[in-house]
Image (spheres, helix red, strand yellow):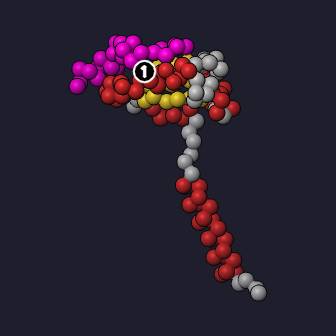
């Protein structure tokens, strides 16, 4: 059996369409730098860096933050977990060199809307302590006056 040029065109077109649909259904994983860039001037970001998802300090931090969700939202705070064992080489370099973390232990980083690191801790942080840090920031003061 011989394929005509039209048949080949249909086969190739179908394969391209299938590849495009498959690529669109897989979620693209954004780099940490891209996440922080996209959040700039929109959200404050609380990075919870831990070696693994079962790290005791990370589990404690989750427990502390869980009941405070409405207050986190009110402060435009995006909580993002960074599992150090699962990072790409580029993200690992970003975490250790740009954000200046150990890259091996638990670290909490509060990133302001301007993109700067506002607080750095190596132990879980209580929501109250976190909110005190945020609420004295000039941008947060301005937000509270508007609301």
Asked if residue 83 is positioned above or below residue 134 in the image, the reply reads: below
Residue at the disc numbered 1: 64
Drawn side of residue 82 relative to residue 141, left or right: right
Residue 63 appears in the figure: yes
Magenta span dominant secondary structure:
helix
**Residue drawn 36% across the image and 14% down it:** 128
Q: Residue furthest right?
A: 1
**Residue drawn 29% across the image and 23% down it:** 143
Q: How far across and how far down the image is residue 79, in percent?
A: 45, 28
Drawn side of residue 137 relative to residue 13, left or right: left
The N terminus sits in image quarter: bottom right
The C terminus sits in image quarter: top left
Q: Residues within 10 Å of mark 1 (few under 14, many from 20)?
A: some
Q: How far across and how far down the image is residue 52, in percent?
A: 61, 28
Q: Quadrant of residue 29?
A: top right
Drawn side of residue 102 relative to residue 27, left or right: right
**Residue drawn 58% across the image and 19% down it:** 106
**Residue drawn 39% across the image and 12% down it:** 129
Drawn side of residue 40 relative to residue 58, left or right: left
Q: Is residue 130 magenta?
A: yes
Q: How far across and how far down the image is residue 86, in percent?
A: 64, 33
């Amino acid at each position: 059996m011989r394929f005509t040029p039209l048949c080949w065109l249909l086969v190739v077109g179908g394969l391209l369409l299938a590849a495009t649909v498959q690529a669109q259904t897989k979620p693209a994983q954004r780099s940490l730098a891209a996440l922080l860039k996209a959040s700039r001037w929109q959200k404050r970001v609380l990075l919870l860096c831990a070696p693994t998802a079962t790290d005791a300090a990370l589990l404690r931090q989750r427990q502390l933050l869980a009941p405070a969700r409405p207050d986190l939202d009110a402060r435009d705070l995006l909580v993002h977990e960074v599992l150090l064992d699962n990072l790409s080489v580029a993200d690992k370099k970003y975490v250790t060199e740009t954000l200046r973390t150990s890259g091996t232990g638990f670290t909490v980083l509060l990133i302001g809307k301007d993109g700067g690191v506002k607080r750095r801790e190596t132990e879980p942080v209580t929501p109250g302590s976190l909110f005190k840090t945020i609420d004295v920031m000039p941008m947060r003061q301005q937000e509270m006056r508007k609301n």
